Amino acid sequence: MLSVLRVHLPSDIPIVGCELTPYVLLRRPDKTVTTDDVSESAPVDGHFLRYKWYRIQSDRKVAVCSVHPSEQATLQCLGCVKAKIPVAKSYHCSPKCFSDAWQHHRVLHDRAASAVNENGNEEDELFGRFNSTGSGVINASLSGSASSTSLTNGSAPLYPATVAQRSGGETWFEVGRSKTYTPTADDIGHVLKFECVVVDAETKLVVGPGSTLLTSRVIPAPSPSPRRLIPVNGADMMGQLDSDGRLSSSGTFTVLSYNILSDAYATSESYSYCPSWALSWPYRRQNLLREIVGYRADIVCLQEVQNDHFEEFFAPELDKHGYQALYKRKTNEVYLGNTHTIDGCATFFRRDRFSHVKKYEVEFNKAAQSLTDAILPSAQKKNALNRLVKDNVALIVVLEAKFNNQGADNPGKRQLLCVANTHVNIHQDLKDVKLWQVHTLLKGLEKIAASADIPMLVCGDFNSTPGSAPHALLAMGKVDPIHPDLGIDPLTILRPHTKLNHQLPLVSAYSSFARMGVGLGMDQQRRRMDPSTNEPLFTHCTRDFIGTLDYIFYTADSLTVESLLELLDEDSLRKDTALPSPEWSSDHIALLAEFRCKPRPRR
């Protein structure tokens, strides 16, 4: 007979919005062991599995620590209560926790005078919409709230939430009837119970003992303070968002560039300081999606997007928010893993703002093959290709704006835009390969520029710090012949050095912060810039490395920067050691710039 041997959850802490999928180990009648599901529509030997999820609600409310959400709170900051700061942020699990967090916690108090509490009822946020009286009578609002959240959880048919049991000051509410369950705000602070039983397909009666597990208390998804858009064109006030969340300035568009950290690279060995639940893909994907959607960018350039995650998650999810998706997977001549988990570059654009004109795919492996065929004797090709072939790619997209940007003197003229999205090779000992990849991409963009009068954006993770040869090539249009990076060139692919140039008038968008005048927020942003390079102090922050690797370059003859997404402060990130963290789910930070097309002279 079918029997359940074991059930357990891979993730140790349930989080609102992150799907829970228990591991269920079965023994089939033929004694084989499997993790395959056995549904009512496809029973095995006349039996199938039935699943149920319950929320265990206690009459005693439990607060969770704002710093360590897996821990129960033991003290509350009264300063937060007086300042009407969201109550969830006032709890701590120990005096040490409170003192360690004070440097960052006091910022909440400093901001309280002007901050507006947008979190609704404070008790709702922490405990869910649940109330009970001392007599044990459940408030009538509960059943409606609980049933509404359970109707769409999993693939189960509609059913009302029911009280399964009440004893010892606890009430069990059935919240799901599928193997998976996604905790809701109503579950915050409560333990969930998963039940799996074998059912006779004919009698519909339970056969044998059931298998159950209890989770730890459900925690809210951490919510970092929103990053602001800061005008850099001389305006003295912060950007105002319209009803769609975009800047209300007409004729402008926003571009986001973000390396989201592929799940294949997000290992506990590499990021031991990040809690395992915050490093898990079910959590990170929801947190990343929430962040990306929250920026409401018109164009989104993502790097390290796994092939399966693009097809199964990002493309369909961002489609719901009005984005069309384009993708270029890395090549797999070097990569030895599953082709479904190879990462690549994904570019999304809002269908109501742009239409797709053309797509170019750049495979640096192919460029390497052409290069070696042209300049190297056959005996040296193998060694050369071993150095050059690294599977990196770039995705170039030509879009047409659906909004008018030309003014009265150019009515009806098409406004095209070319957006390049790339992820350059990571290895620090391959400085020649990095520079060659960037040079190859720029030469391709020059050909596009020669065929059309078109503004250009070059976005991505270039794995190159400010001052490096690739950055110099991008920002200055050439590389100094005595640049130290040029000393590494075993294949002589960088010679003559005079060929390392391009004619695109590229400028780094974030260098605009360094050129700003005095104004609200300006000084704070300048402190987060490196005055020697006019680039951010960092866009990548781990325990072992902090520095700038990501950029948004634009052609300054055709585009102007209107606003930039504020940079993050290193101290605020170091409270969690580094990135990724429960608040920020990548080891990179997102960059976002708002642009306006310059009027083009008539030809």
Image: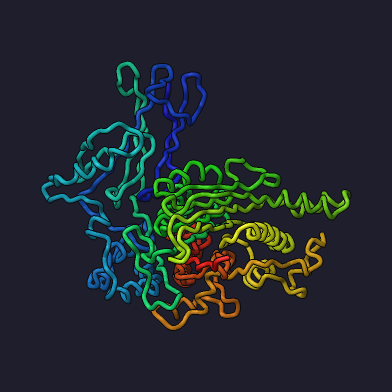
State whether residue 129 appears in this view. Answer: yes
**Quadrant holding the N terminus:** top left
Tell me the residue at 27%/75% (across/down): 113
Tell me the residue at 56%/62% (across/down): 455
User: Residue 130, position in %: x, y?
Assistant: 20, 50
User: Residue 204, position in %: x, y?
Assistant: 30, 20
Q: Is residue 377 left or right of residue 588?
A: right
Q: Nearer the viewer, residue 325 or 290?
A: 325
Report the number of discs.
0
User: Residue 335, position in %: x, y?
Assistant: 67, 46
User: Residue 134, position in %: x, y?
Assistant: 12, 51
Tell me the residue at 25%/52% (across/down): 128
Q: Nearer the viewer, residue 114 or 404?
A: 404
Q: Nearer the viewer, residue 455 or 360?
A: 455
Q: How is the image coloured?
A: rainbow
Tell me the residue at 71%/63% (across/down): 435
